[in-house]
Image (cartoon, coloured by chain):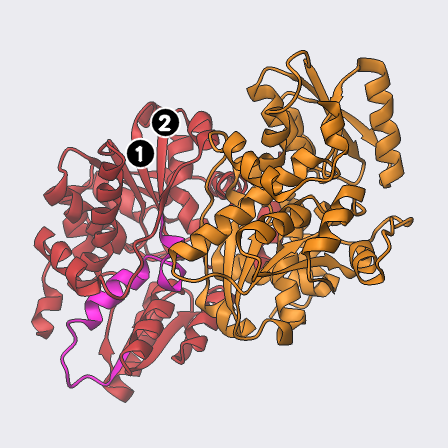
Chain colours: A red, B orange
Amino acid sequence: MQNDRNDVPRSADVFTAAQHIASYIHRTPLISSRLLNTLSGANLWFKCEHLQKVGAFKARGVCNALAQVPSEVTMVATHSSGNHGAALAWAAAERGLACTVVMPETAPQVKRAAVAAYGAEIVICGPSQADRERALESVVAQTGAHVVPPFDDRRIIAGQGTVALETIQQCRERGFTPDVLVAPVGGGGLLAGVGLAVAALAPDITVMGAEPAGADDAQRSLRGGVHITAPQVPDTIADGLRTSLGRRNYAVIRRTVRDIVTVTEHGIVEAMRMLWMYTKQLVEPSAAVGLAAVLEHSARFRNKNVALILTGGNMDLDRVADLFSREELS
Amino acid sequence: MQNDRNDVPRSADVFTAAQHIASYIHRTPLISSRLLNTLSGANLWFKCEHLQKVGAFKARGVCNALAQVPSEVTMVATHSSGNHGAALAWAAAERGLACTVVMPETAPQVKRAAVAAYGAEIVICGPSQADRERALESVVAQTGAHVVPPFDDRRIIAGQGTVALETIQQCRERGFTPDVLVAPVGGGGLLAGVGLAVAALAPDITVMGAEPAGADDAQRSLRGGVHITAPQVPDTIADGLRTSLGRRNYAVIRRTVRDIVTVTEHGIVEAMRMLWMYTKQLVEPSAAVGLAAVLEHSARFRNKNVALILTGGNMDLDRVADLFSREELS
């Protein structure tokens, strides 16, 4: 069983994942905003994964992973800046498993609080990917916990891909198929999963990734054709996208994703502000990266039907002041 | 026709209003949050009027009013702290009517901007009810505009009441009838309309009003049995609820509303914070007054099915910092 996790996932895994997780997760709404359509010059459809269980699409991946964990496992562990950790803590609690989450000291307080509220143990570490992995290895050495990685995992990628199956289905229920599907990319669990789903279900849809310019390792990897793991500590307010692209994720993305575009920090805050004002949906900075991409690269999206994934809605409300005070508000 | 406006509305007017406005407005969703149910000890159902046209239930009243305006009218006017003004500006633009809105200097910037964006003219006045009325009289004297009052109007009360028809219907689609329906009260357009709708459609439902303790004229009027018009400038962050109870509104409310409870400013901010965090819905302070009432008067709601109206979602995002910094955040 453990060997499966070393495999690169296939499209069929996404369809299987949809079966595994259906009874645990929400079919979240797909919404639109006339004002954002006017402002962007495109027809935008937002998949509301901030309304998913634990407030993020990450619930999908962990549900799929735990559905496949060997029955002798009693404890799971992971590292996460927040939403994956909260999701694993939630899913583990649902199944009566113990759970430990390694979190960087830079993780938002509200995400730490969520992990703790689901009854998981938290281990704080430094901000880099290496810091996280070292801390997780030490947890495993001490406890023998079964690791559910945040993104570089066949089960996780397949689980996240289910959001694209649903999104395409919901668009078709409205009588169209999207021209483009945009997903933010950090570790690449979501983007790889979306790529696999689209390749099987609707290969005419263009899959695009979007990432902060201050954490652009995925773009450089895809465009350069070589998997780069960013050595520096990434600099972006999009705390969910600070991780580097995973190996399996890269392997899938290079086959299934057309391009990855980058966005500025100003563009992320502005897109988040627009989503708050015009859709009244409280999404976190990482979730606004897709809209930021559409607005900063508008020529690539003009007059198209574009589906975007609002990935999560978990943020410290007392950080809101800092975010918006950095920017000129209209 | 003008005479009708002097009448106190009846339940039948609400059903007629539902016909008049159906093609203009959204049937907004009814949502729930398991966490808020646990925290409150009740089953709470939130009617999402912050997702209504112009971001507030006020779209209902103005649509009903304009459906009944004499055909020779080419210009309408009102006074409003924001949402009613934006709603009238929007509805007037849809029908090709000119529109002037008198707004207090204390109205949030985002609400002024919305009125302006719909093409209406804005006249700024002082913060009191008397200031507003004086400024509106002067607009009418100069232009002959047809006045669409914000709340003390048969058509407006009937239009706002349609939200209760929908809410009860949506609860029944889920297999239950609410025990209590809670609506915030400022001028009383919404609460009176809800009272009329419930009296006709489901008289077993208890209708409760909720208002800020710093603007408690409606509670004092209902409990004392005499219509009090608050002389002082009310003190509350719930900018939509600073108006005094209207005459027709009082006449309806005393017959159809069980009680009005007051809430603290701390309770409003805390309830708003919870709605943001747990439902991911960006509602304005006035919209949180109902949840604040349930939390501050919990004994009256325990184990009941409670429907609450999230009245609007329009607020200055740069005010968020001030709001939350006044409070200790958990």
For residue A52, side relative to residue A321 (left or right): left
Depth order, front residue of B283/B132: B132
Tell me what residue is drawn at x 33 percent, y 41 percent. Answer: A308
Any part of residue A240 in sight: yes
User: In the figure, residue A159 lies in which quadrant?
Assistant: bottom left
**Is A74 contained in the magenta span?**
yes
Residue denoted by label 1: A306
Which residues, given as a range, are shown in magenta? Answer: A48-76
Question: At which x and y percent is residue B327?
Answer: 70, 64
Disc on res. A25: none
Depth order, front residue of B239/A145: B239
Tell me what residue is drawn at x 52 percent, y 60 percent. Answer: B277
Q: Which of marks 1 and 2 is nearer the N terminus?
A: 2
Disc on res. A42: 2
Q: Do labels 1 and 2 share a chain?
A: yes
Any part of residue B84 in sight: no
Q: Do the residues labelled 1 and 2 touch (CB within 8 Å)?
A: yes
Q: What residue type is labelled 1?
A: Val
Tell me what residue is drawn at x 36 percent, y 27 percent. Answer: A42
